[in-house]
Amino acid sequence: MALSILHRVTGVGLGLGLVLLAWWLAAAAYGPEAYDLVRGFTGSIPGRFVLLGFTFAMLYHLCNGLRHLAWDLGLGFGLRTAHASGWLALMAAIALTIVAWLAGYWARGL
């Protein structure tokens, strides 16, 4: 039940994250001053938490979506399997979020 609610919450988070993406794209089109404003926000501590949350939401929604795809194929309906696949989706999303952020820092040379 909790993972189902988390799936819905991350879906809403992804929708809200599109506002940030639209702001970033519009700022890139408006010029350097507007773009610097977005970079200032995304480089700040609150901005990085927003980006971290967006990254987790995207990856959890992906992992849990694959779980739902397996269900659509008729796989994994047993109670133990459903619990295990739920935990697997959550742990995979956390691990992938960490890997994505570490790769980002590594790519920037930090």
Image (spheres, rainbow, N blue to C red):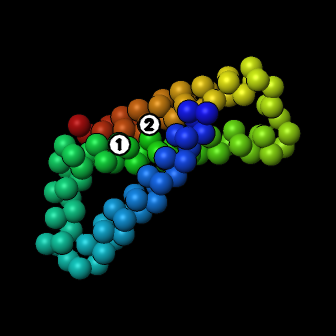
- Which residue is at the front of the view, 18 or 38? 18
- The local crowd at label 2, few if under 14, some if 14 to 19, many if 20 or more residues have their Cα within 10 Å, is many
Q: Residue at x 84, y 43 (%)?
A: 73
Q: Position of residue 66 (x, y in %)?
A: 68, 42
The mark nearer the N terminus, 1 or 2, is: 1
Q: Position of residue 24 (x, y in %)?
A: 30, 66
Is there any visible trace of residue 32 in the rendered image? yes
Q: Residue at x 44, y 41 (%)?
A: 56
The quarter of the image holding the C terminus is top left
Q: Residue at x 49, y 47 (%)?
A: 9
Which residue is labeled 1 in the image? 52
Q: Position of residue 96 (x, y in %)?
A: 49, 35
The quarter of the image holding the N terminus is top right
Number of callouts: 2
Left or right: 27 with respect to 14? Answer: left
Which residue is labeled 2 in the image? 97
Quote the CA–CA distance across marks 1 and 2. Answer: 8 Å
Are discs 1 and 2 less than 8 Å apart at CB? yes
- The local crowd at label 1, few if under 14, some if 14 to 19, many if 20 or more residues have their Cα within 10 Å, is some
Q: What amino acid does circle 2 point to? A: Thr
Q: Secondary structure at mark 1?
A: helix
Q: Quadrant of residue 104?
A: top left
Q: Secondary structure at mark 2?
A: helix
Q: What amino acid does circle 1 point to? A: Leu
